[in-house]
Image (cartoon, helix red, strand yellow):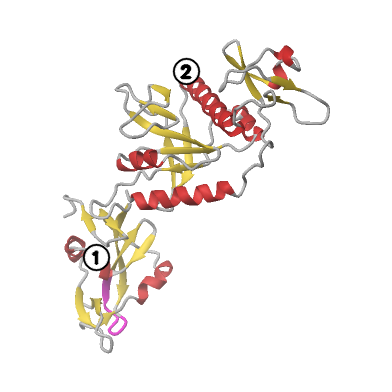
Amino acid sequence: MDIAQIKAISARFSQANGSGEKQPGAIKIPYAEKDGFLRHVSQVEKGLACGCVCPVCRTPVVARKGPRMRHHFAHYPGAECNAETVLHYLAKRLLFEKIQTLLNQQVALVLRWKCQLCGNQHSFNFFENVKAVVTEQVFGDCRPDLSLINEHSEPTALVEIVVAHPPDENVLVFGSQRQIPLLIFRIRSAEELEELVACPTINPELIIHCPRRRCPDCGAPLYTKALYVLPAVCWRCGVPMNLAFLDVDGQIAGPEDFSAIDRQIIRQQGVILRDTVRPGDGQRVVNHICPHCGVATGNAYLRQLKRYEQRLFVQNSGRYCRQCHEHFDDENSI
């Protein structure tokens, strides 16, 4: 996978994150720790009677539950503890607890997302072959906030929580090189933290992963290609002839994009092609040839495929890279 592309996606995400930054003091922390468990401010008494401590710096906090401001926990004046650090820690811990609960329930975690790499919609059960969720486990040069691991302690998905800083570049590179999904959660406020807890499942803001096979030459996604043959008639003599085209994951391609194996396949279906040089610009073109009169048919038919109700599907003939235009034909295509 193209690591530069991954970093560009992360950069755009971080820029969008920066537009919604909170002003200092604006983050009202709604959770603190009591007896080893996180407690919401609504679950404790007000003031020092709450008996809670900050889960990061371990100093006592005050439960402020006045009539005008949003209820929250606060440090004593002069405490050296950053609200964004606390928010990140709480999001990581609460998300860990939620994923652990879902794993214990033995339910599927099917997430759907629009791929930032190939543009298509994907869905995947992120609990497939998952044994546990772990926090800040080191893999190579990276230490993601959370990781889903299999029975061999190998990561199957990585999780990064973004509050004020972009995702760790080492995590991006590690996930990209090993084709491991990266789930990114953005938490900037108490409201978003509470939404994380209230949601019955998990909803990452960004998933960086493309389950498509990758081009071994350039790393771009590979798209399934299928060959079709159209029964038609020659525009000059009216004799029946066949035309062919490729469907590359929903996009139509003409004979100029056929591989050598594609040509062998359609030749067996009675399709005749001829390479010619177009007068004027000298560009190479590939035309269909009428088996009766030998006249060439251009590619105008590709713009009118909806008019052809009858299409003879030949077969899935392999995969195609749109970036470097390489074909990867199946061994059993012919």
Displayed quadrant of residue 21: top right
Q: Residue at x 34, y 49 (%)?
A: 3
Identity of the residue furthest to the right in this view: 67
How packed mark 1 is, by other alpha carbons closer than 10 Å (few <14, some 14-19, many 20 or more), is some
Counting from the top left corner in percent of width and height, residue 236 is at 29, 85
Q: Residue at x 21, y 62 (%)?
A: 262
**Is 39 one of the magenta-colored residues?**
no
Give the vertical position of 93 relative to 236 (above or below): above
Asked whether residue 69 is in view, the answer is yes
Q: Is residue 259 left or right of residue 1?
A: left
Name the chief secondary structure element in magenta: loop
Are circles 1 and 2 on residues that touch, CB within 8 Å? no
Q: Residue at x 71, y 20 (%)?
A: 62
Residue nearest the observer in this picture, 269 or 251: 251
Asked whether residue 316 is in view, the answer is no
Residue type at mark 2: give it: Asn
Q: Quadrant of the C terminus?
A: bottom left
Disc 1, SS: loop
**Is 238 one of the magenta-colored residues?**
yes
Q: Is residue 197 left or right of residue 66?
A: left
Task: Tell me the tag on residue 52.
Answer: none
Residue type at mark 1: give it: Phe
Task: Tell me the tag on residue 258.
Answer: 1
Counting the numbered discs, the total is 2
| Residue under pointer 2 | 104
Query: How far apart are the two marked residues, 1 and 2, measured between alpha carbons?
Result: 50 Å
Magenta residues span 235-242
Residue nearest the observer in this picture, 172 or 52: 52
Give the vertical position of 247 relative to 105 (above or below): below
